[in-house]
Image (cartoon, rainbow, N blue to C red):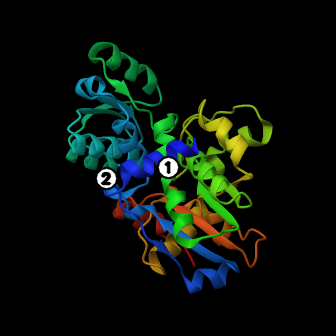
Amino acid sequence: MFEKILAAAQRLDGVAHKTPVMTSRLLNEKTGNNIFLKCENFQRMGAFKFRGAYNAICCLDAAARKRGVVTFSSGNHAQAIALAGRLMNVATTVIVPQDAPVVKLAAAKEYGATIVLYDRAIMSREKVAQELIAEHGFALIPPFDHEDVIAGQGTAALELIKEVGDIDYLFVQCGGGGLLSGSAVSAKHMLPDCKVYGVEPELADDATRSFKTGVLQSVENPPTIADGLRTASLGKYTFPLIRRYVDDMVTVSDMETLRTMYFLWTRLKIIIEPSGAVSLAPLFARNLPLRGQKIGVILSGGNVDVRQAGQLFDGICE
């Protein structure tokens, strides 16, 4: 897989943004560590998802590109597929839950995707996708459980480590595990002694339970505010990669995520969505017993409705 990540980095060179790595004296003082934030909220379309989407479409043959691509997503992957398709002149169709964040849905439309809405309470997005594939011959690029998607996502950690050098720990949020598994592969190949931690919302802890038990677990429509991490379960590719390359999994509450997000907005001036703040929450709000460590943290995205964020922040105290 690491060879696929290196190949993905070549395809993304000059197309994806090499997102900034930011530091904060205040954050370091609060956590007792030296923290490096890989800011994927500054990636094209506002999230790391562009990396995997673009790489996966690049890997399709000419006939598949001509037929078009279909995917399903709560928002960020939908935008990523739509933008990547637009850049490569490939028609895209995205299957999106009716309750997806409006800002993410609007962006996918603006990038030119055909939107198909579904009710996640009564419908299966996979079934909707298969019906469209049968009718139109689309190529399916799922949001995480796809080798070319995972390889693209792994370039975020690759860039981080190339820029800052040795790190003791890497913290990465986990929904379906595409970013976590790709990042873990990159980290372990570049820095074998680096400890990789996956982070999930307490209300969507299927990957943590899967990691701890060795048996794939699932969760149904978890009500976490981290809408990008509501995936039902890990996949056939991401689960074994996480079991092999990740050192531990931890969970955080929605309030811990909000406190972290509020800090990033107000003190570091980094606009981040709830899912993007989850990876930092164990260090900032949970106060994990780590001190004096050099730690990389991936902030996965910043696609959030600022009006909704204001409501979420109501009553938050630093």
Q: Is residue 18 visible?
A: yes
Of tags 1 and 2, which is closer to the observer? 1
Q: How many discs appear?
A: 2
Q: Which amino acid type is shown beneath numbered disc 1?
A: Leu
Tell me if residue 235 comes above or below residue 175 in the rendering: above
Q: Which amino acid type is shown beneath numbered disc 2?
A: Val
Residue at figure coordinates x 42%, y 41% from the top left? 74
Tell me if residue 187 comes above or below residue 245 in the rendering: below
Residue at figure coordinates x 59%, y 58% from the top left? 254
Label 1 and label 2: CA atoms lie apart by: 32 Å
Q: Is residue 140 left or right of residue 91?
A: right
Tell me if residue 128 comes above or below residue 119 in the rendering: above
In the picture, the disc for residue 16 is: none
Residue at figure coordinates x 32%, y 19% from the top left? 132
Judging from the image, what secondary structure is the residue with disc 2 in? helix
> What residue sits right under mark 1 in the picture?
6
Picture coordinates of residue 171, whole percent (x, y) = 63, 60
Characterize the local packing of mark 1: few (<14), some (14-19) or many (20 or more) Cα atoms within 10 angstroms. some
Residue at figure coordinates x 29%, y 44% from the top left? 84
Tell me if residue 63 comes above or below residue 205 in the rendering: above
Picture coordinates of residue 79, whole percent (x, y) = 32, 46
In the picture, the disc for residue 103 is: 2
Residues 307 and 287: in front is 287
Judging from the image, what secondary structure is the residue with disc 1 in? helix
Q: Is residue 240 left or right of residue 107?
A: right
Rendered-image quadrant of the C terminus: bottom right
